[in-house]
Image: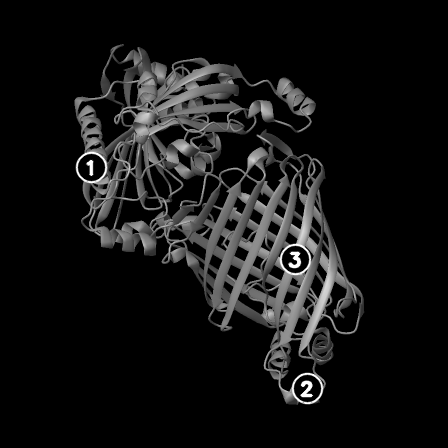
Amino acid sequence: MCRAAKLLLLLLPALAALQPLPARTGSVTRSLVDSMYAYTQREGLAIGHLRAQIYVKFGVQTHRVNALMRLIPFVSRMEHGDHSYIGESVTRIAYTAPSVLDRKEVAFYSTNPYMRNLRDMILANLSISLYEPTLLRDRVLSPFNRRNRGYYRYAADSLLTCGGRPAMRLTYRPRYRNMQLVTGWAYVDCETGQVREADFSFTYNSQHFDCHIIPGTAGLASLLPVGMWIDTRFGFARNWVRLRLYAHGDYADLLPFDAVRMDSVLHHSRYDLTPLNRLNSDTTSVIRDLSYIAAQRAVPLTPAEDSIYAAYAARRRQQEAERLAAETRRGTGGGQTPPDSAAGNSAADSVALLRPEPQRSIFRNLDDLLLGSHYITLNSTDIIKLPPVITPSMVEWSNNKGLSVKTRIRYQSQWRSDRSLLANLHLGYALKFHQFFFKLPVDFTFAPRHGGVLHLEVGNGNRIYNSSQAEDIRRALSRDMSMDSLLKAFDHYKFDLYNDYYLKLSAQYELVNGLKARLGWVYHGRKLIGWNEVGASQGLDHRYRSLAPNVRLEWTPGLYYYWRGHQKRALFSRWPTFSLEYERGIKAFNCDGEYERWETEANYMIPLYALRKLYLRVGGGWYTKYRNTYFVDFTNFHYNSLPDTWQDEMLGRFESLDSRWYSESEYYFRTCVSYESPMLLFSRINPISPYIKRERIYSNILVVHALFPYWEAGYSVSTHLFDFGVFSGVANHKAVSFGCKFVLRFLENN
């Protein structure tokens, strides 16, 4: 027992229910917090392996008055008006240290006709222990971990008994109003520092969460939540939704962590962790039978919940009767057996989508068309996914690229033995360049056990100038060294740009674990923009074709993985990923671009404590043995006019670099470093800190022919509505350039 707590206990009745502490409690608080931080280490508690079954009972209340709620990515489709739903789910979890977390939804049932799974951020990402650095796997810093002490203020405000043992009520609140921090209280055992009960709340992506957790009583079970109550609320444009749930954990095979044994397992597994990921490798479908869930139910239903289930079953029976009556009137299949009866389940025992009511059907179809994603099932194996017509995340702006919009259509077909066909049509338009972009990659997985993939891609690239013009501009740039002069030379030089259309065909195969080889062909057809008789009289070729074999090797040492059926799924590696690419243009089939291109690169993501990450990327490329006219077009270093995702840390973007620099030099070398933190600069300023998810700083160095070097530094913030970054570049130690970038995120759950 901590000394300060012993002195206080002598002055209090042994079984005091709840009494305030004296005014001077600073030493008590510090002693209690230190004891809480040291609990797992002092007791020698560390989970090495566990299996658990989580039963969840939830209720959903919705209020919808317009279609704007469909803009929110993490909110399921809502029916118009006020509705109440309930549901239950059963999930199995397996965990093996150091970080193999295996989760599978076994059963799910809901009276919401559009809900096919429980989209809850807490349960899907809950850390394995309260004492981990984060309460969730990739967000929300835990107040019960020593590393996060600088982010919280603590106060011990009362003394009580909890489970027949003396405990103190410890309150905690964040030093900064940040969405990665929580506010709440916990009952902490005075003798051991164990958290007996915890309550916390936070707001993330404009969703408010109230959580109450009761851990196990002793041993390894004390690290795990046995009971959890979650109340989450979200509102937008006069619409709102509220989710309340109770989760009960039943744990088995709870084993302590053994570092020697774990090292032995990792060593003898030869990087194959399939035995530790049996749930991920389980391909059985989700059970949607209410009778099965009733047998797993940890707590009984209330009369109100029973009435909601009964009303839902009555609606389903009524709709089924109306359907059969309509078919009888048409004389088509009036005697057919309902699908549920054929499956051997009653209307109350299996889930099926209720058909939309006839009223408001026009408006429902309209908001489906404009605001909802669409899945078109062609047959049992083929699915087409269409994106919403209107979605904020399709828009991006930067002063360098201007305004861009994008969308994507996805087709997927899954066959036996995990062979599959995947096609993604990317469409975009860059207003600054008045150019339409498209890209259609198609991947056929023919040997899933060995990473065998056939890749076909067609599309159009950026407008580009050829090597002859690049030599002319290099001679002009050699006389000037400042950034202003370099840009003036660019501005005064009249570029003859070419549209680029390409076709790529390749085959990829994993030779050994972590080592992939790709062999293929690349064809480019480039056509001069605005070519006419004047251009022909000046000797400008209006069309260039190139054909080149391409070889690429990619190696990730020490790659751990598991098997899901016949598919190999990568887990993690403690090493960087290295790549080497070689391409040689040949003179054949009316193609005259002769060149050799080499590129090499290494990239590495280093996770740090408290949700911090460090991204490193080093690489270079060069052209050799070039003849005639060719085009400088690197794979890893090129200007992309289509808006990409904001997750560009590993991509090494140069936001302030003019697009014309990418084709100027026949070689390049770059190093890119970015650092990410949930609380860095502006996230510590209280008026704006509640809206900032993370901050990043960038430092990129580039060496090309005329820029020796070019250094770019940047800073960006990510909020629940948008991401914004500012960047500054310095060329040849002289004048600077500035740029900024703005991307709509609109409550994306990341």
Q: Are marks 2 and 1 in contact (CB under 8 Å)?
A: no
Q: Judge depth for marks 2 and 1 and give the one in front.
A: 1
Q: Residues within 10 Å of mark 3 (few under 14, many from 20)?
A: some
> Which residue reaches farthest front?
331
Q: Which is more N-terminal, label 3 or label 2? A: 3
Give whichever of 276, 165 is nearer the camera. Answer: 276
Q: Residues within 10 Å of mark 1 (few under 14, many from 20)?
A: some
Q: Give the secondary structure at mark 2.
A: helix
Does the image show residue 358?
yes
Q: Amino acid at mark 2?
A: Ala
**Quadrant that contains the N terminus:** top left
Q: Which is more N-terminal, label 3 or label 1? A: 1
Measured as percent of width and height from the top left, residue 184 is found at 31, 32
Residue corresponding to mark 2: 536
Residue corresponding to mark 3: 504
**Quadrant that contains the C terminus:** top left
